[in-house]
Amino acid sequence: MTQATPPFTSISAWPEQLQSQGFVLLAPEDVAKWCGAEPAELETLVPTWDALPIDGYLKDGGRYRRRRHSSYEVEQSEVTRVPHRAHWQPVSYNALHGGMQRWFEPLEASWDACPSFRALLVGIAQAAAWLHGSQKWFVEAHQFRIDTTDGIGRPTPEGAHRDGVDVVAVVLVRRRGIKGGETRVFDAHGPWGQRFTLEAPWSLLLLDDAKVIHETTPIQPLLDEGWRDTLVLTCRGGGFQDASEAQA
């Protein structure tokens, strides 16, 4: 059942809730308390969403998704952008677009100079460490715009899925002139689930990828063309996912 108000978690309860139900939703005012990322500072990055290249890998032939992608190593509070690399997922996690190396343009250089973006990277690594122990974490940052150029935009064309990582963070940046885009989080091993719509800029959804599957429903325009901007961070121990795993 869709909740009229997203089920935000109090900042003091996030560790226990992440462990028990597999996801946590933080209100914008609590994001800074969680990891030190200030929404006002993150706002300086918003114009970069207007310069995202088209995703040329969509197998449905759509032109509704624009994106950039960069990869980072995070160890304690140290953040390092690694040489640009392809985004790769196994078919077992992404039946639609898995099994191929997808080369997207990297995040603009201004991102690395933003302390609040670096705080988000450290925050997701610390959440993963809370679940799995301290280690070096491999974080991929995906900058998305889903629009209604084709009349409908699909935030997750692969459907309900897991990402094959340890922790996923979905940050809503903006919604403009759309309906739909309902977030759905379900227990990966049972019938339990919740549905809600993210509307507040810089609200943050944190997912334990082993426990839950997630998806976002398609968007449609209300009047003229609309769009939904998000930042998705995936965090994995032991290394980035790459094609060598399929050969092992």
Image: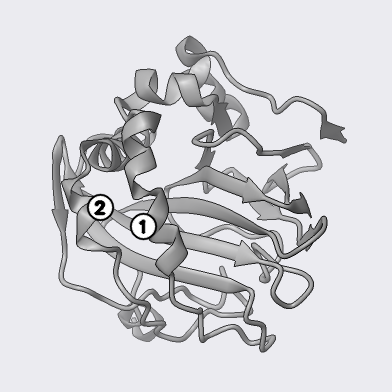
Q: Nearer the viewer, mark 1 or mark 2?
A: 2
Residue placed most toward the observer, 64 or 86 = 64
Disc 2 residue crowd, few under 14, some 14–19, many 20+, Cα 10 Å: some
Q: Is residue 33 above or below residue 3?
A: above
Label 1 and label 2: CA atoms lie apart by 11 Å
Q: Secondary structure at mark 2?
A: helix
Disc 1 residue crowd, few under 14, some 14–19, many 20+, Cα 10 Å: some
| Residue position marked by numbered label 2 in the rendering | 111
Quarter that holds the C terminus = bottom left
Residue placed most toward the observer, 213 or 145 = 145
| Residue at x 15%, y 36% (from the top left corner) | 76
Q: Is residue 1 above or below residue 52?
A: above
Q: Farthest residue in the top direction?
A: 12
| Residue at x 22%, y 43% (from the top left corner) | 114
Q: Is mark 1 in CB contact (under 8 Å) with mark 2? A: yes
Q: Is residue 242 above or below residue 42?
A: below
The type of residue carrying mark 2 is Trp
Residue 239 in view here: no
Residue 119 in view here: yes
Label of residue 182 in the image = none
Q: Percent from the top left, x then y, of residue 8?
A: 62, 22
| Residue position marked by numbered label 1 in the rendering | 141
| Residue at x 66%, y 50% (from the top left corner) | 176
Q: Secondary structure at mark 1?
A: strand
Q: Quadrant of residue 42?
A: top left
Q: Percent from the top left, x then y, of residue 175?
A: 63, 48
User: Is 5 left or right of 35, judged from the image as shown?
Assistant: right
| Residue at x 34%, y 28% (from the top left corner) | 38
The type of residue carrying mark 1 is Ala
Q: Percent from the top left, x then y, of residue 91?
A: 55, 78
Could you tell which of marks 1 and 2 lies nearer the N-terminus? Answer: 2
Q: Percent from the top left, x then y, of residue 104?
A: 37, 77
